[in-house]
Amino acid sequence: MRACERALELRIPAVAIFPCIPPSLKNEVGAHAFESSNLLYRAVSDVKKRFPDLIVITDVALDPYTDHGHDGLLSVNGSSVDNDRTVEALCHLAVLEAQAGADIVAPSDMMDGRIGAVRRALDAAGFSETGIMSYAAKYASAYYGPFRDAVGSKVGKDAISKSSYQMDPANSREALREVRLDLDEGADIVMVKPAGAYLDIIRNVRETCDAPLAAYQVSGEFSQIHAAAMLGWLDYKRTRDESLIAIKRAGADMILTYFAAEVAAEM
């Protein structure tokens, strides 16, 4: 609540809320994601009641709730993520988030066909006004480490890699195809994640579509600037601002960043 109040004071228009779930509430199928006691639903509901003008974005993925740390449900033999069962679960999750008051749901799982399925589920449940921000080009990146540590969603020691459903960092063409598919399926906003190491992807998407484009400056980007500044290797504020300017210059309409409040406070 304090962070959201601060955001409004600083004229930050939106917040993205991610849950940190105790390990005792996690299991193989992420069942807590669908319980009314879920911290995320309570938080979203309370934020919207107190700050109705603040846009609330919620993550649509199962990794905060699964004990294996994957974004989806595993196949029967546990050797892969089951795309279709996961999409069905994500539709349920998106509707529950909309019921709690989310203005925009943001599927971050990278399953095939999930944007169209979520759009149909929201419309059928009476939430046609709820927007979809698609993690359209989400790469299997090493930069997510600090976030996964924070929310406890690190993948366990199994044979499945998130690279089996997230994108290959060496592949730029697939990003454009994924963006087109998600827009065709009903995405209102498309996102590139991470941002700093993928400025070329942001530019390529900007040049090939006119849809609202978001870029996520992820935890690893944020952390490495802090770490280098703490060691005296970089000027903190100048490096921070230059990193954000680069993302904007590449073509992003909006930036999700952990620097948001401090940058807004200085403007």
Image: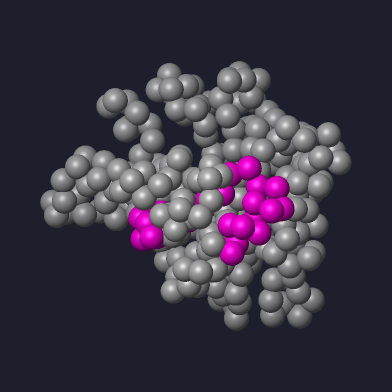
| Quadrant that contains the C terminus | top left
Q: Where is residue 112 in the image (x, y as percent from the top left)?
A: 70, 64
Q: Where is residue 198 in the image (x, y as percent from the top left)?
A: 40, 60
Most extreme residue toward the left is 232
Question: Is the residue 226 above or below the residue 173 in the image?
Answer: above
Q: Position of residue 73 (x, y in %)?
A: 73, 65
Hey, which quadrant is residue 103 in on the image?
top right
Magenta-colored span: 177-200
The image's colouring method is one colour
The residue closer to the viewer here, 247 or 221, is 247
Q: In this view, does 151 lie to the left or right of 243?
A: right
Residue 11 appearing in the image: yes
Say which residue appears at 46% left-offset and 51% top-offset.
206
The residue closer to the viewer here, 89 or 28, is 89
Question: Is 99 in the magenta?
Answer: no
Say which residue appears at 64% left-offset and 24% top-offset.
48
